[in-house]
Image: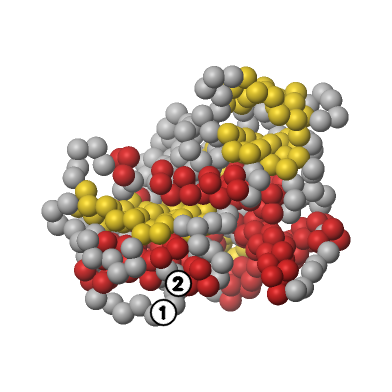
Amino acid sequence: MTTYDLIVIGAGPGGYGAAIRAAQLGLKTAVVEKDQPGGVCLNWGCIPSKNLIHQAELFHSLHELEAVGVSVDRSTLDYSAVQANSRKVVKTLTGGVRGLLKKNKVALLKGTARLTDAGEVTLDNGDVLSAKHILVATGSRPMQVPGFECDEDKVLSSTGILALTRLPAELVVLGGGAIGCEFAYVMNAFGVKVTLVEALDHLLPTEDFEVCAVLEACFKRAGIEVLTNTRALSLDRSGEKLQVTLQSADEELVREADKALVVFGRVPNTGDLGLAELGVQLDERGYVNVGDYNQTTAAGIYAIGDITRTPALAHVASAEGEMAVEHMAGHAPRLTGVDAAKVPSAVYCEPQVAGFGLREDEAGERKLKKSVFSYSGAGKSIAVGKPDGLVKILCDAETDEILGAHIVGHNATEIIHELLLAASAELLPEDLCSTIHAHPTLSEAILEAARGINGAPIHA
């Protein structure tokens, strides 16, 4: 039996980051991973999808060259080369993670792990490991809904669509969350006829409604059929083409497609780990209940990331992993729990969507000050041909405390952090207004939205 101070199960962003931080704090650490380091995010999620989005943006923008007299034959697109490029990026980054683990003297062990006793982990090859602390970071997998099961041939999950080497002519996307919107954008940009279906009243149901209205308008203008308030009733895969039956508010619809992407949500990977047997409390859906530092109800066992009830985002898992190992190592963690109101969301279609904190529809009786500034009022957006978008700031009506901010537009996922830092540091909009912003930049839209809280925008 090999003994460690810490065993991490799962080498995704939360797991490998926690392992490296633990090693920095002097803990002898091992990471057990059944696949490749980097987890779903790096191998079949965040990274390859963002590479596809980047390539889609390049391909879609080729028509802009016509304005300066350059014509490009886009019919020669080889999507297999696009997909191969995304896998090359993954290979580079997984190699980087391996290098970081090795540099920090973290043992990377290949295998499937199960907790078999207090402080004990058994691998599927029979090896038994022991440790004072165990950190479970096993992530999540696509939800399988009866009648809409993914076969990764005609009916795809987010993993299956990333493995495609040929584009379908027609694609139905069931689920208008972040993954659905990102892949709807990618496929549309590469020339696929896309229908995007969302059961609730707007795309990205957890985002601000005004922001989503801009996104929906841009999608429709690009040729994506957007169906909101529409449920998927059935999926017939018996013929050459899929038949997807949908129910809108007032009629039943049928859409044909070569393939369907089903992204109804994700479920935690907590089964067959031996957690409950060791006293780890799980809720009815299999999520692990954790304390302020992600400790579970079983001594010495911690859990982070998608298997807990905090936002299922890679950056949340990373923050939780560092916080957990700092706690177990006896250091004062830089965070005490994850404040969901200070976690940025990020959706990487074009236009991008980002936000944090309170949404206007959540305010209830609370009195707010609201400022909305259009991207088209910032000269940079016009200069680069990206005028669609807005910055929205919500503040307490009496104190001007920044309670939430929401952006849709080019590079929204980058510029949201100025507002997030301001809110975290308890700065007021007037503090942002006293900061000189470079011109021309998209960040000037934030400056103008901050001015608007007290009725003094210059360019509106």
User: Which residue is located at x 58 percent, y 34 percent?
Assistant: 227
Q: Can residue 330 be seen in this view?
A: no
Q: Mark 2 to mark 1: distance in Å?
A: 8 Å
Are the residues at dot 2 and dot 1 in contact (C-beta closer than 8 Å)?
Answer: yes
Pinpoint residue 178: horizontal percent, then vertical percent. 54, 47
Pinpoint residue 255: horizontal percent, then vertical percent. 71, 29
Pinpoint residue 416: horizontal percent, then vertical percent. 41, 63
Q: Is residue 231 above or below residue 136?
A: above
In the image shown, does 127 or 181 lie closer to the viewer?
181
Mark toward the viewer: 2 or 1: 2
In the picture provided, is 393 more to the left or to the right than 212? left
User: Which residue is located at x 75 percent, y 74 percent?
Assistant: 69
Residue at the spot of label 2:
379
The N terminus lies in quadrant: bottom right
Identify which amino acid the numbered label 2 is placed on.
Answer: Gly
User: Which residue is located at x 21 percent, y 48 percent?
Assistant: 368
- Label 2: element kind: helix
The C terminus lies in quadrant: bottom left
Identify which amino acid the numbered label 1 is placed on.
Answer: His
Q: Residue 378 carries which label?
A: none
Q: In this view, does 217 lie above or below 32?
A: above
Residue at the spot of label 1:
439
